[in-house]
Image: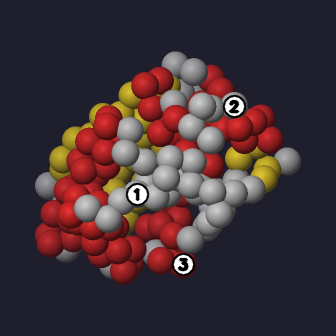
Amino acid sequence: MSETCPHQSTHYHFGHGGKDAEHQAHQADIQSLLAQHTQLSRQVELLSNGFRAITTSNDSALVSILQRHVFDMKARFAKGRAIRSWDAVYALLFAYREQISVSYERLDNGVSSVVTTDQADLVEVLHAHAHAVSRFVQQGKEAAGESYPLSAKALEKLTNTPHN
């Protein structure tokens, strides 16, 4: 049985994202992508240890925003600067980021990404992240306020992180 994060909108596992210029620029790109989601296309292949995704657009300006966003999020991930930490999926991604491998490749019309882990108990989280981003592409802002379901076992892993 799946549950959603019991702390949605009341508990940020890593604090709020920030009010600095870098965070504001990231938020602006996210809002642009959500607003123009109908101009994006995404294909996902779930792997036994994570996922592979290709996200593209025929709009060159949107491709630039997408590519900047993906590489900004990779840098943010490496620094442990969480986003959406009210959502258990994202909180777990950041809590266990050192056990997750992320690689991106710029394409002429978008980005190819491969996100994997050697930790079997994190694969569910990676798959949930792949589904969440696909929903953002399909539904835009409508999906942005939702948390994504995880099993009770995965939520227990979040409860046991030192970041709560």
Q: Which residue is mark 3?
A: 142
Percent of width and height locating residue 158: 66, 38
Residue annotated with mark 1: 17
Measuring 62% from the left and 23% from the top, which residue is drawn there? 120
> Label 1 neighbourhood size at 10 Å, few (<14), some (14-19), many (20+)?
some
Task: Name the mark on residue 47.
Answer: none
Find out whether the residues at labels 3 and 1 contact each other: C-beta distance under 8 Å. no
Q: Residues within 10 Å of mark 2 (few under 14, many from 20)?
A: few
Tell me which amino acid carries mark 1: Gly
Using the numbered discs, state the Cα–Cα distance from disc 3 to disc 2 in whole angstroms.
Answer: 31 Å
Residues under numbered marks 3 and 2 in contact, where contact means CB atoms less than 8 Å apart: no
Colour style of the rendered protein structure: secondary structure
Side of 76 where 118 appears, left or right: right
Q: Earlier in the sequence, mark 3 or mark 2?
A: 3
**Residue 74 visible in the current orientation:** no
Return the disc, 3 or 1, that comes first in the chain's sequence: 1
Position of residue 96 relative to residue 89, above or below, is above
State the residue in front, 33 or 53: 33
* Quadrant in which the C terminus appears: top right
- The percent coordinates of residue 59 (x first, y second) are 19, 73
Q: Residue type at mark 3: give it.
A: Glu
3D distance between C-alphas at marks 1 and 2 = 22 Å
Residue 17 seen anywhere in this rendered image of the structure: yes
Secondary structure under tag 2 reads loop
Q: Which of the two discs, 1 and 2, labels the residue nearer the N terminus?
A: 1
Which residue matches tag 2? 160
- Asked which quadrant contains residue 35, the reply is bottom left
The spot of residue 73 in percent (x, y) is: 31, 49
